[in-house]
């Protein structure tokens, strides 16, 4: 009924069966990837019809994002360009951050029945596949030691890397089947982003972040504007690589 995990002790070194890679290690990773893709498409089908957010709300949030990027990456553009963009946001008369933003009369995000239903569907599509996968791994591959890490780690990682294997003498660099599942649960995020794109429905981190952000009171954009305006006012252009680049090129060519 599968391949048994044969371990040989040679000078305190475990020699793993070569067949573990093809029968345990690789199947778990491939099945988890396929389940994530299936979950993404099923969640898309179960979602309510797409409701576009208000253009005004999207514009306000994008304005905050643009100002933060200017503060962080302002040194990568010429000083004159930095000052023009800074004035666009902070000009006392025409600056975006000096305008009053009227409060949105809409209901709280969490009180919208459609949003509650969508959140419930997402939670079900996150919990049910994980429960099935963990049950499958515990039933067929319980107690398997799959792989050895190529780098040393401290004893604090033993509980994370060797779940389901109760051996105090086992080196901490060996990874059990159940721990391999959790490593793939977070490690496949980059692969899924390449295949399914940004913001895919198989991203559990994104789902938890949406629940945290949507659970509070409506955001006061006026306070965010004031805070970002003060932070941007303190930002200064420190020169960077672009200042005087024309003169340096002329000196090099002459």
Image: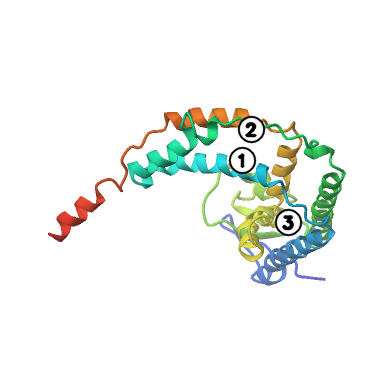
Q: Which mark is residue 101?
A: 2
Quarter assignment of residue 113:
top right
> Pointers 3 and 1 in contact (CB under 8 A)?
no
Q: Which residue is mark 3?
A: 201
**Circle 2 Cα neighbour tier, 10 Å, few/some/many (<14 / 14–19 / ≥20):** some
Upstream in sequence: badge 1 or badge 2: 1
Mark identifier at residue 60: 1
Query: First in sequence: mark 3 or mark 1?
Result: 1
Q: What is the secondary structure assignment of the residue under circle 2?
A: loop
Q: Residue visible at 68% across and 72% down?
A: 22
The extreme front residue here reads: 93
Return the mark for residue 40. Answer: none
Gap between marks 3 and 2, in whole Å?
32 Å
For mark 3, give the secondary structure: loop
* Residue 228 image position (x, y, % from top left): 53, 32
Q: Nearer the viewer, residue 185 or 109?
A: 109
**Badge nearest the viewer, 1 or 2:** 2
- Choose top left, top right, bottom left or bottom right for residue 82: top left
Image marks 1 and 2: residues in contact by CB distance under 8 Å? yes
Q: Is residue 167 visible?
A: no
The spot of residue 87 in percent (x, y) is: 43, 36
The residue under the point 73% across, 33% down is 218
Q: Is residue 128 above or below residue 57?
A: below
Q: Earlier in the sequence, mark 3 or mark 2?
A: 2
Q: Residue furthest left?
A: 254
């Amino acid at each position: 009924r599968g391949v048994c995990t044969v371990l040989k002790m040679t000078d305190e070194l475990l020699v793993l069966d070569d067949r573990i890679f093809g029968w345990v290690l690789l199947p778990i990773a491939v099945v988890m990837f396929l389940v994530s893709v299936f979950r993404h498409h099923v969640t898309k089908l179960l979602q309510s019809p797409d409701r576009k957010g208000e253009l005004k709300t999207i514009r306000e949030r994008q304005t905050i994002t643009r100002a933060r990027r200017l503060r962080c990456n302002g040194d990568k553009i010429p000083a004159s360009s930095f000052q023009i963009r800074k004035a666009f946001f902070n000009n006392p008369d025409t600056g975006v951050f000096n305008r009053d933003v009227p409060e949105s009369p809409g209901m709280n995000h969490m009180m919208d029945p459609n949003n509650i239903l969508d959140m419930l569907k997402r939670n079900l599509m996150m919990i049910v596949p994980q429960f099935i996968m963990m049950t499958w791994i515990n039933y067929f591959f319980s107690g398997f030691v799959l792989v050895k890490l190529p780098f040393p780690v401290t004893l604090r990682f033993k509980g994370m890397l060797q779940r389901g294997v109760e051996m105090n003498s086992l080196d901490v660099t060996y990874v059990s089947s159940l721990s391999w599942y959790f490593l793939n649960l977070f490690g496949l995020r980059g692969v899924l982003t390449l295949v399914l794109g940004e913001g895919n429905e198989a991203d559990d981190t994104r789902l938890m972040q949406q629940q945290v952000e949507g659970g509070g009171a409506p955001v006061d954009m006026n306070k965010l504007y004031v805070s970002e305006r003060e932070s941007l006012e303190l930002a200064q252009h420190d020169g960077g690589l672009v200042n005087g680049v024309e003169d340096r090129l002329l000196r090099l060519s002459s």
